[in-house]
Image (tube, grey):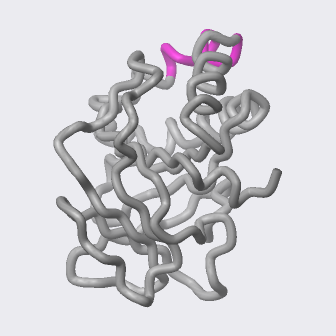
Amino acid sequence: MTFSDFEAVVELRRYTLHPGRRDELIELFEREFVEPQEAAGAHLFGLFRVPSAPDEFVWLRGFPSMAARKEALEQFYFGPAWKAHRAAANATMIDSDNVLLLRPVRRGLAAPPPGTGVHVTVSLGSSPAPESAFAAFETEPSENTFPQLPVRTDGPFSVWFSRSPSESSFELVPTARSLIR
């Protein structure tokens, strides 16, 4: 299986954190949650700070299918790593339910083009991605097979990633463990 296989189902997760607690969550997340999630069958593409929102943490998690997503999430969230550290993680968060469940229109998260800067655009409705986008997604219409983690149903949404900003994008700054740089 290649990294691009994990772009079939992608979660764009945007967490609002208690003021000043973002780096605390990132340190915990990178130390305790990356390997256990990947061992369970998820692939973490990107972990990001948002310069325009100092109390927001954005991350991307991919799966090869909805069935694989359900299995991986069950294994991780009912497993020892989450049980041991969930209280500390949850204590940093105000809201963890701003989650878009997406499917690819154009793959490219696994192998973004050379360059610097990562910008994401989230658009309500069905909007075509510009040529400059290296990956583009739309709302995954399947039912959420792991309802313990809510996903937004107020879409549909179009989401794309590029190296250059646009009028409606926001910048993502990769953390130390982010694969997308």
Q: Which residue range is magenta in the image?
A: 80-88
Which residue is nearer to you in this view: 118 or 99?
99
Tell me: residue 110, above or below residue 66: below
| Quarter that holds the C terminus | bottom right
| Left or right relative to 166: residue 144 | right
| Left or right relative to 89: residue 120 | left
**Residue located at (26% from left, 38% from top):** 152
**Residue located at (68% from left, 72% from top):** 111
**Main secondary structure of the magenta stretch:** helix
Is residue 145 shown in magenta? no
Give the x, y percent position of residue 108: 59, 71
Which residue is nearer to you in this view: 155 or 96?
155
Tell me: residue 173, above or below residue 128: above
**Residue located at (34% from left, 51% from top):** 139
Is residue 84 shown in magenta? yes
| Left or right relative to 154: residue 102 | right
